[in-house]
Image (cartoon, rainbow, N blue to C red):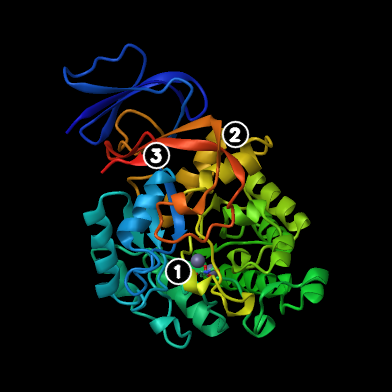
Amino acid sequence: MTAYLITGAKIVGGEVADLLLDNGEIVAVGTNLDTPAEVETIDARGLIALPGLVDLHTHLREPGREDAETVLTGTRAAAVGGFTAVFAMANTDPVADTAGVVEQVWRLGREGGYADVVPIGAVTVGRQGSQLAELGAMADSAARVRVFSDDGDCVWDAALMRRALEYVKAFGGVIAQHAQEPRLTQGAQMNEGALSGVLGLTGWPSVAEEAIIARDILLNAHVGSKLHICHLSTKGSVEIVRAAKQRGLDVTAEVTPHHLLLTEDLAASYNPVYKVNPPLRTKEDVEAVREGLADGTIDIVATDHAPHPVEDKDCEWSAASPGMIGLETALSVVQHAMVDTKLLTWAEVADRMSYRPAEIGQIGDHGRPLEAGAPANVVLIDPAVERTVVPSESTSLSRNTPFEGMTLPGRVVATFLRGRPTVLNGKPAR
Ligand SMILES: NC(=O)N[C@@H](CC(=O)O)C(=O)O
Ligand SMILES: [Zn+2]
Ligand SMILES: [Zn+2]
């Protein structure tokens, strides 16, 4: 295995040092390092070294919708975005609700070699919301599932949600909730407000998200288990989570890059590339989620990378599937919305996009500080360049990026997974 000497990188945006990667590990960090006779040197002057990013919320679409994405294409896109581990959501076909399916997804990730794939198990059989899935068997499987979610749908039955929280408590698992009260969002197409009225699209009110978050925080406090909130999107949700954390209640939350940057106004184009669950919200909401991410109320950024084939997006708004791709643009959006605005430092970006998601998802090999002895999961980024997002250039099989035409800062130059490059010079390396 080739050893790599990365020279002159700003370590997590701070001090300049060299990094020696060998045998899958970070062997040393410092200057004038002793290197093996055969070493590949990467000049990283001007670049920032971050721990490999971890995405707690990715839709890889395999099995079932391999026309939209596969484990291989999705993890390749993840590597291009700087990720070394992704959690694969369970809303596949068949649903990831048995040990057999989660083991298959886990194995496909291993074979691809671009990023570690950690399957998320469904909470209920077929994500139908009526009967608990075999959570224990998925936890005991080779995939070691710790995160469970019916994402795409809400576990709306309070008794079932309570039982799920109780069940996973036995092995320290976490229930990741897609907070969407179904009765309040029947036929919902976009954020509910003045604009949805003008556009004639059925509204998705903030309270449909907030009511479930409040309920689940209370249920979880009662049970004493672990609750994670997927793609939180409203100011009210931030306030509820902030108050819960102040009271010492155990809850974690994520925000997507698109909810950190985009607003509901984009729906006025009737272009379904802007249709997503939860919907794009208002400027006030965007400001609130940015503040929440900055002060730690929101623990992490997760992409909710949701690839869809052209035919599911190139149609009228109400017929289109909700969801946006995001793996390849996530870090640039975070730099633009959070770093360039001085809301987060690079060290805090490492926390929100690597350390914390690995901790919530309970994977030890990722999300470790760049120190000797840690697995060599490293990403090198150039924060000084800008690029314009062109959908046809995406590594993902799908093209449904809402950032088309936007000029965003930063670019991933190289990604290393256990010391092996998955991306070099911004291109997949394997
Ligand atoms: N976010 C979306 O709009 N869509 C996701 C499901 C989900 O995350 O709820 C998908 O699977 O396409
Ligand atoms: Zn969801
Ligand atoms: Zn999702």
Residue 346 visible in the shown view: yes
The residue sitting at 39% across, 60% down in the picture is: 397
Front-lying residue, 75 or 385: 385
The span from disc 2 to disc 1 (Cα, nearest Å) is: 36 Å
> 10 Å neighbourhood of mark 1: few (<14), some, or many (≥20)?
some
Q: Is residue 187 above or below residue 92?
A: below
Type of the residue with mark 2: Thr
Check residue 309 in the rendering and tell me which mark sits there, or answer none. Answer: 1
Residue 198, image x, y percentages: 82, 73
Front-most of residues 326 and 249: 326
Residue 267: x and y in percent read 70, 66
Location of mark 3 (residue): 368
CA gap, disc 2 to disc 3? 17 Å
Residue kind at label 3, given as amino acid type: Arg
Which class describes the residues within 10 Å of circle 3: few (<14), some (14-19), or many (20+)?
Answer: many
- For the residue carrying disc 2, how many other residues have a C-alpha within 10 Å: few (<14), some (14-19), or many (20+)? some
Q: Quadrant of the C terminus?
A: top left
Single out the mark in the foreground, 3 or 1: 1
The residue indicated by pointer 2 is 345
Judge left or right: residue 103 versus residue 259.
Answer: left
| Residue toward you, 122 or 428 | 428
Q: Residue at x 71, y 58 (%)?
A: 263
Labels 2 and 1: the sequence-earlier one:
1
Instruction: Look at the picture and state if 353 lies above or below 6.
Output: below
Lower sequence index among marks 2 and 3 = 2
Residue 3 vertical position relative to residue 68 in the rendered view, above or below: above
Give the image location of residue 412, x and y in percent: 45, 37
- Marks 3 and 1 close (CB-CB < 8 Å): no
